[in-house]
Amino acid sequence: MTGVNRRHPGRDSNGGLSVPRMATAARAPLNLSGILVVVPPERIQECAADLSTLPGVEVHHTDPATGRLIVVQEADDVAAEMAGLTAIKARPHVRMAEMVYHYFATEGEEP
């Protein structure tokens, strides 16, 4: 068990954020993942619109020259996150979809 860091209030003795257990127990987990998706460049707008219809998925950036899209997915748990990635990979015209970033937090925490 780590102690409270007296020099830096709000941080434990290892330098990490010190969060009371009761505060985190009541909060739901949040899984955010950044996914790189590659599609044929001529299909990028169509694929971006299609991906946006998936639950918890937002298309944040498209590069029409390369057919690359940056997608952020929010899921309730890791199983749902992986199911969402599998669903993205199964969409028409998707050549590749890989998770390049994952963030896990409790609700209310800033990513």
Image (cartoon, rainbow, N blue to C red):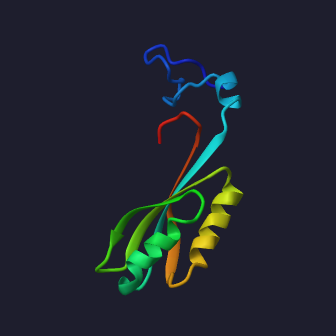
Q: Residue at x 41, y 83 (%)?
A: 43
Task: Note whether 70 is above or below 67 in the view shown.
Answer: above
Observer-nearest of 74 and 101: 74
Residue 37 seen by the camera: no
Q: Position of residue 69 (x, y in %)?
A: 40, 70
Task: Note whether 43 is above or below 83 in the view shown.
Answer: below
Q: Position of residue 5 (x, y in %)?
A: 51, 18
Q: Quadrant of residue 42?
A: bottom left
Query: Is residue 22 left or right of 56 when viewed as pictured?
Result: right
| Furthest residue in direction left, as rendered | 65
Query: Is residue 16 left or right of 44 when viewed as pictured?
Result: right
Q: Position of residue 13 (x, y in %)?
A: 53, 23
Q: Residue at x 44, y 18 (%)?
A: 8
Q: Position of residue 38 (x, y in %)?
A: 44, 78
Residue 89 seen by the camera: yes
Task: Note whether 7 is above or below 107 in the view shown.
Answer: above
Q: Quadrant of residue 26?
A: top right
Q: Residue at x 60, y 19 (%)?
A: 3
Quarter containing the N terminus: top right
Q: Residue at x 67, y 55 (%)?
A: 78
Observer-nearest of 83 and 8: 83
Task: Note whether 19 is above or below 37 in the view shown.
Answer: above
Observer-nearest of 106 and 54: 54
